[in-house]
Amino acid sequence: MSADLTFTQSVSSTNTTFMRPSSFYMSGLYNVPHAKYYYVFLCFVYAVTVLGNLFIMGTIYLARSLHTAKYIAVFNLALSDLCGSSALIPKLLDMFLFENQYISYEACLANMFFVYVFMTMQSLTLLAMAYDRLIAICFPLRYHAIVTKPAMTLIIGVMWILSLSVIALMVALVTRLSFCRSTTINSYYCDHGPVYSLACNDYSMNSIIGSVLTAALLYIPLILIALSYVCIGLALQKISHGAERIKAIKTCTSHVILVVMFYLPIICVYTTALTTYIDSNVAIINTALTQTIPPMLNPIIYTLKTEEVLQSVKRGFNNRLKDELATLKK
């Protein structure tokens, strides 16, 4: 099943006619019984993601003790998680839960842009957080001089500019493609690969930039994070007191869990797709879960595993309780 190929035509200097469909059709899960229960589950995931990330962002904003360089990065991760899930899940539910599987050409490109921008920011923010931990453990005496709030704000700002620029370039290259055959996207959102592979003119440039950006924005940050933890491990070997070593390890626990949850599923899905055939339904379910579950769990892990956040939450709760008791006494 494909969208009607009503299109606008434009003639380039080489007299090549480009065809742009008015809309694409999202195939989603095919012939899967009780698929609607899966989409209802994603509704629950989205609700928890929104509440959790708003909670962690609100806690960081209200607690003065968390107004540090480290928590600028944590705040940015929560923002990226919230926006990334909002770019993906509501549209997914609209298409498949309410059977509205057509998406206009312009909306498809916008969907692609926002999903990839926030996924890129999640990856780069985890790298910034690894840098924070590296300096904190390997250079503890210079930490507050190196990792300052202005420095972390600059790092995050550069990451946003980089993400917006490279993803805008990737999406812009899609506009040079002509779609004269099927307009059915074998995915649950406007995924870059499934979209450009539908083109009937040369899409080698799209394939190259897709591979380059995957390496630059996914694999390279993961390698750098792994190297930072090698350095951290060597630094911890030099700490003579066991209690201090355990305390230092605890400060990294939350970040390590976030890194594993974000990168491991995505790397597994991408690597498996390159080496063997995966049923489209299995690929869609796996990819959807890898993009939606980590943003839901990140704020929960940071709240439960980070002593500073827990203490801030407790202080906020106690202050609120004192205010209410004072009001009742009046």
Image (cartoon, rainbow, N blue to C red):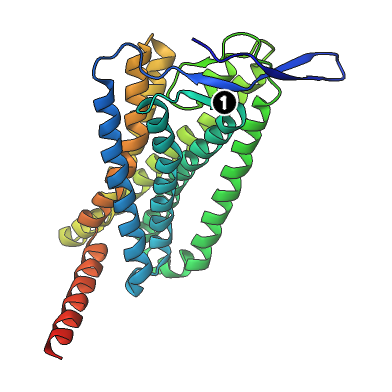
| Residue 237 shows up from this direction | no
Pick whichever, 120 or 328, lies toward us: 328
Q: Residue at x 35, y 11 (%)?
A: 279
Label 1 SS: helix
Q: Measuring from the top left, give residue 115's x and y in whole percent.
A: 49, 37
Q: Measuring from the top left, give residue 280's x and y in whole percent.
A: 38, 13
Residue 9, relative to residue 104: is it above or below?
above
Pick whichever, 135 or 36, lies toward us: 36
Question: Which residue is outermost to the bottom?
Answer: 330
Q: Quadrant of residue 269?
A: top left
Q: Residue at x 36, y 29 (%)?
A: 288
Residue 227, relative to residue 249: is it above or below?
above
Q: Residue at x 40, y 58 (%)?
A: 75
Q: Measuring from the top left, give residue 204's x and y in whole percent.
A: 65, 16
Q: Quadrant of residue 329?
A: bottom left
Q: Quadrant of residue 283?
A: top left
| Residue placed under numbered mark 1 in the picture | 210
> What residue type is disc 1 on?
Gly
